[in-house]
Amino acid sequence: MNVIFKRQLPRRTFLRGAGGVIALPLLDAMIPALGRADATKGPARMAVVYFPNGVQVDSWYLKTDSNIIPLPEKLPRTLEPLEAYRQDVSLIGGLTVNGGRELGDGPGDHGRAGASYLTGAHPKKTFGKDLQAGVSMDQYAARAVGGATRFASLELGCEEGIQGGNCDNGYSCAYSNSISWRTPSTPNPPEVRPRAVFERLFGSGEVERDPVVRARQEKYEKSVLDSVLGDAKRLDGVLGATDRKKMDEYMYAVRDIETRIQKTEQQNVQVPTIDKPSASVPENYNEHTRLMFDLITLAFQSDATRIITFMMAIEQSNRAYREIGIADSHHGLTHHGGDREKIEKCIRINRYQVEQFAYFIGKLKATKDGDGTLFDRAMVTYGGGLGKDHDHDNLPLILTGRGNGLFNLGRNIKYPNETPLANLHVAMMNQLGVPAEKFADSNGKLGYLSDL
C-alpha cells in the first residue's frame, strides 16, 4: 500500500535556474500508482517532415499491382537507407493534393506545393502582401490540443528563405518557404538555427540575435544545465533508481546537443567563408539535420510540444549537396529533360535525405517514453508536395512511428488515384484528440492504416 501514497511529481515538472528552464521526460514518479497502466501509455505526438522538389518515382516506388503488400527486404534505391527499419515504415502511394495543381493559374508548382501540402488549399497567385492559402492541419490541431504543452507547436527547417518577393512564376516566396500556416494569410516561417530552438526549449526567454549582447547576457560558454543543477540534486532525492537512470540519459542528451551547437558556433566564427551563414547554422547538412532531429526528439521526450513540422529544405531549393559530391543546384537538376547524369544526381540527393530521416527513426526507437518508446507514441510522415514531373498526385510519402496504435507498419500501401492527402491528416488529428470529421478536401476515412 505504501506505493499508493508515494510522492507524485506533476507531469509538467521543470528544473529551473538562473540561465534556463528544463522540462523533464515522463518519469515513474509522475504516474499515479492506481492509474499506472493507462498513464504509462503517454500522449501521441505528430511530426511532419517535408522534402522539396519531388522524386524520381522509378527509384522510389515498388513495382507491384497489389494494393497492399509487406515491404520486401530489398527496397527501391532511394529508400535503401531504410532497409534496417523495413518493419518500422510503410510506403504510401496514390495520395493527392488537388490544391497544388494550377487550376487555371499557370506555372508555379513549387509555391503551390509548399502552401497546399498541409492546408489542402489552392494558394492565391500573388507575390504581394495579399497572401491567401489556408490554415494548415498542424495549426488546426495546435489550436485544439496545444494548450496541454509549453508550446502549441514548433516549426523547424534546414534552409532559410525570404518571406517576400516573387519566387515562382508570380507566387510569393512565402508560399515556397513555409508549410505551416497559422491563418490563411499568415505563414509560420521555420526556425533554422539549432541554437534558437535549444534556447526556446531550455533557455530563459527571447533569443538575442546580436552575438555580442548574447555573450554578455548568457556568459556564452556556460551550459544551461549548470544553472539547474541545484534543482536537479533536490529532485534526485525523491526519484527511484529507474527514474534516476532516465534523468541521467536525458540530461546527457541535452548536454550533447548543447556541446555540438557550441562547436558549430565556434567553427563558424573561426573559419571565414563566403556567404557566411547565421551563427549556429551548421554548414554541414548531416550535422544540421541531425541536430534538428535530436532537438525534435527532446521536445517530444520532455512534452514541450506534441506537434512539429520540419522542412528538410524549402521548395524550389537551390541547395548544393557537396557532402555527397554534388555542386549543382538541386532545383536545377530536377528540370533534367531526361538527362541521365542529372537524374542520377537527383536520386543521390533524395537518397541522402532519406539517410538523415533514417537517423530520426533510430532516435525515436531508442528514446524511452513511459513503458515504451517515443516510436510507439509518435506518428511521423516523411514526404513532399511534388511527385513525378512536378505533379501533385501519387505523392511520395512514408509513415513511421506507431502513433499509439494508429499505424500498422512494414507495408506498401497503394490507395486509389486522387485519394486526398487530407484523409490522412484527419486520421492523424483524430489520434491527437482533435474531433475533426473533415479537413480541407478530405472525403472519407483512410483505410489500411491500422487494420482496425
Image: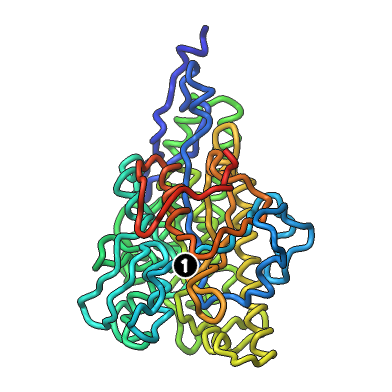
Q: Check the image and name the residue furthest to the left.
A: 130
Q: Would residue 87 be found to the left or right of residue 135 on screen?
A: right
For residue 228, above or below residue 275: above
Query: How many callouts does the rendering have?
Result: 1
Vertical position of residue 44 compared to residue 398: above or below? above
Q: Can you give x and y, in whole percent of width and height, for residue 134 in the image?
A: 29, 64
Residue 387: percent from left, percent from top: 54, 74
Report whether 8 appears left or right of 287: left
Q: Residue at x 67, y 52 (%)?
A: 411
Where does label 1 land, which residue? 311
Q: Is residue 64 left or right of residue 189?
A: right
Residue 441, by quadrant, is bottom left
Residue at left 37%, top 53%?
153
Give me the residue at 38% from left, 79% from top. Answer: 102
Residue 429 appears anywhere in the view = yes
- The x, y position of residue 78, in whole percent, is 68, 71
The outermost residue toward the top is 1
Instruction: Identify the colour scheme used.
Output: rainbow
